Amino acid sequence: MGKDAIRDKVAIVGMGCCKFGENWDKAPEDMIVEAAFEAYEDAGIENPQEQIEAVFCGSVYPSKGTAEVADALKLFGRPVSMVQNYCATGTDAFRYGVFSIACGMYDTVMVVGFDKPKDRGVSGPNVQTAGVRGLPMTPAGWFALCAARYFETYGATREDLARIAVKNHHNGTLAPKSMLKKEITVEDVLKAPIISWPFGLYDCCAQSDGAAVAILTRRDLAKSFRDDYVLVRAVSIALAPNPQSDPTFDFLRWKPTVYAARQAYEQAGIANPFREIHVAQVHDCFTLTELLTYEDLGFCEKGAAKEHIASGTFTLEGELPVNTDGGLKSFGHPTGATGVRMIYENYKQLQGKAGPRQVKNATVALSHNIGGAPQACGMTILTMP
């Protein structure tokens, strides 16, 4: 791997994000336009038809594919490509945009992550009734098996998971474009209807509609757009064996995260992620996912997450704030948009423009998605110049 191939060579000079939620009154094109024009304004782009050379899209449930983006933004006569990689789709689209600039093919490109799953007429991913070693499987049922094993092995409890939900709901109330703006308590989480033990309603994120956009350019051109640009230090994608048939899967860690982190940390030159990462957005489709990710990313030792949760390590005031905009749990999870939305939050945090959820002195930010069985993971690490 060319670990220095992209490091600090590509800058983010503009980003936008539409309001996430059940956007019944908007088409995908409406959300894309809303996010793109915020990004244009942010980057000072007045003539995108001349300034944007290529577009990389990520969407899991597109109705018209790349045409939704090209038609919405009138970006014709240039390449518009689409990437799909489970919940890491937005991060993978971003990765293609970074590579296209780092290799010298383009100067300035756009990355668009979007999805409108509410128009599909179903409330979530497809349900498989017998997929995990002969056990029933829905997304909640599958991840719940891992929670039960984690509880048995390390003595964690539903209260430990509940504190993650409480944190993310609080952070979501501070993010203007989040889907859910409701403070909850540990007691609320514990009394909520059970979805799949030990998960109750508040342990599960909800799918939402949404779109997010990034404008990327060469580092040496970034100053012509803005002074407070953000650099891409690392971006990684890694696949792992299907855990439902992997005989070495232990139900206590996600191998895709471990593999993607190894790549990203090597690219970024990070040896101690807990000390060198200042703010992180991680995949919290379920509260347990966030807990396992603390450990899989090396933020703490295996089995130690519950002590850090109890002490507030990952709150806005803690040593390593995680999911500062509410995460999937509160901001929402339009699958193809989520990775780009996470980068949007980290971009704002590094610029010091995150308002009441601002993390002090943050100069290095990480984002993380995991999806599929799960088998795919995407990560980015951003820094200030």
Image (cartoon, rainbow, N blue to C red):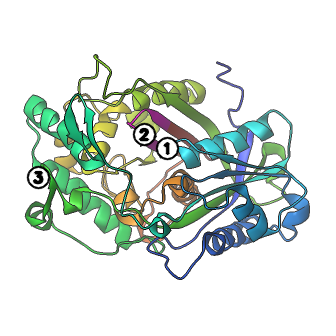
Amino acid type at mark 2: Gly
Range shown magenta: 367-377
Q: Which residue is mark 2?
A: 372
Looking at the image, residue 11 sits to the left or right of residue 139; the answer is right
Is mark 2 in CB contact (under 8 Å) with mark 1? Answer: yes
Q: Is residue 92 magenta?
A: no
Give the quarter of the figure containing the C terminus: top right
Q: Is residue 375 magenta?
A: yes
Looking at the image, residue 80 sits to the left or right of residue 315; the answer is right
Q: Are there few (<14), some (14-19), or many (20+) residues within 10 Å of tag 2?
A: some
Residue 154 against residue 382 in the figure, above or below:
above
Q: Residue at x 28, y 17 (%)?
A: 247
Q: Which residue is mark 3?
A: 159
Q: Residue at x 20, y 43 (%)?
A: 144
Q: Are there few (<14), some (14-19), or many (20+) residues within 10 Å of tag 3?
A: some
Give the quarter of the figure containing the N terminus: top right
Looking at marks 3 and 2 on the same chain, the residue that comes earlier in the sequence is marked by: 3
* Horizontal and vertical percent position of residue 245: 32, 23
Q: Which residue is mark 1?
A: 86
Numbered mark located on residue 270 in the image: none
Amino acid type at mark 1: Tyr
Residue 75 against residue 221 in the figure, above or below:
below
* Horizontal and vertical percent position of residue 103: 81, 32
Looking at the image, residue 156 sits to the left or right of residue 174; the answer is left
Q: How many marks?
A: 3
